[in-house]
């Protein structure tokens, strides 16, 4: 399993890199679970990382706005992101998710970028699409990776909303369609044995490497500890 860590600025990105993160995922938690950061932050982090690891950019927790999402993906890719990650937040149907994801995939075609469709494990409480539908939609739409995160960052984990069997089904379905997978959402050290059984391509974190409170700062030693445990 690869480790994706979500910094908010260059300083945190360096802690993530030096701690052993495999993907540096720039986001802006002030704007939500998959809040987008500014293009110059993506460019600055890219410069600081010096190509040692790929950069991912969160595009936002989207409602059904395929054009806005496609333009955001193009902007993030132009700023240097290798992964563009869209949150299908207020996206409720398979048709809407498909239209969002085909637009994004088309917008970054030929840019050597991986498109990530992210659903939410707590989809019922935010009235969003069931993430278990995403592997089939993602395959049809031409995305590279499907992901699960929590939509509401209130300390409740993905494991409280989806059990191990649900997550195994999600991961196996995606892998059988040739897609990569990521699992995130207040992951804790205690979840590592379950994650090893589930075997997603990537695990995504912020809170755990901030010492439990994602509004504080990423600590290199916690990234190192997590990396060594997975
Ligand atoms: O993409 C990963 C997220 O930033 C996970 O954040 P979290 O571990 O604080 O839920």
Image: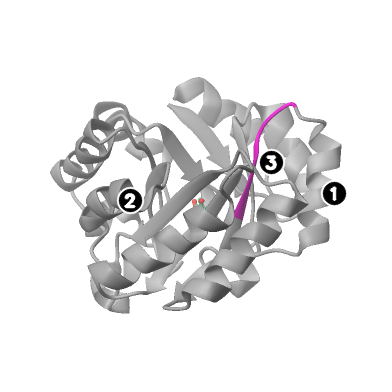
Give the residue at x 33% y 63%.
Answer: 98
Mark sitting earlier along the chain (3/1): 1
Marking on residue 44:
1
Question: Is any atom of residue 216 visible in this view?
Answer: no
Residue 147 % position (x, y): 38, 49
Figure check: 104 above or below 202? below
Q: Secondary structure at mark 2?
A: helix
Question: Is any atom of residue 92 visible in this view?
Answer: yes
Q: In the image, is 189 to the left or to the right of 74?
A: left
In this picture, which residue range is highlighted in magenta? 52-57
Residue 68 % position (x, y): 57, 74
Q: Residue furthest top?
A: 228
Are the residues at dot 3 and dot 1 in contact (C-beta closer than 8 Å)?
Answer: no
Q: Identify residue for label 2.
A: 138
Mark sitting earlier along the chain (1/2): 1
Q: Identify residue for label 3.
A: 219
On whether residue 54 falls in the magenta region, the answer is yes
Residue 15 % position (x, y): 74, 37
- The C terminus sits in image quarter: top left
């Amino acid at each position: 399993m690869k480790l994706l860590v979500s910094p908010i600025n260059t300083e945190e990105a360096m802690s993530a890199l030096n701690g052993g993160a495999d993907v540096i995922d720039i986001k802006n938690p002030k704007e939500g679970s998959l809040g987008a950061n500014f293009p110059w932050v993506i460019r600055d982090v890219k410069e600081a990382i010096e190509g040692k690891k790929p950069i991912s950019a969160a595009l936002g927790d989207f409602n059904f706005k395929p054009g806005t999402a496609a333009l955001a993906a193009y902007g993030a890719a132009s700023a240097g992101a290798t992964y563009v990650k869209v949150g299908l937040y207020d996206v409720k149907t398979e048709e809407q998710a498909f239209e969002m994801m085909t637009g994004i995939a088309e917008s970054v075609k030929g840019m050597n970028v991986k498109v990530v469709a992210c659903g939410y494990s707590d989809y019922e409480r935010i009235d969003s699409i069931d993430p278990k539908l995403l592997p089939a939609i993602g395959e049809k739409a031409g995305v590279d990776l499907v992901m699960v995160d929590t939509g509401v960052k209130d300390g409740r984990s993905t494991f409280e909303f989806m059990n191990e069997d649900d997550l195994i089904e999600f991961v196996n379905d995606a892998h059988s369609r040739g897609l990569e997978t990521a699992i995130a959402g207040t992951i804790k050290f205690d979840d590592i044995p379950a994650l090893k059984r589930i075997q997603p391509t990537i695990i995504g974190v912020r809170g755990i490497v901030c010492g439990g409170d994602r509004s504080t700062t990423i600590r290199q030693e916690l990234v190192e500890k997590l990396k060594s445990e997975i």
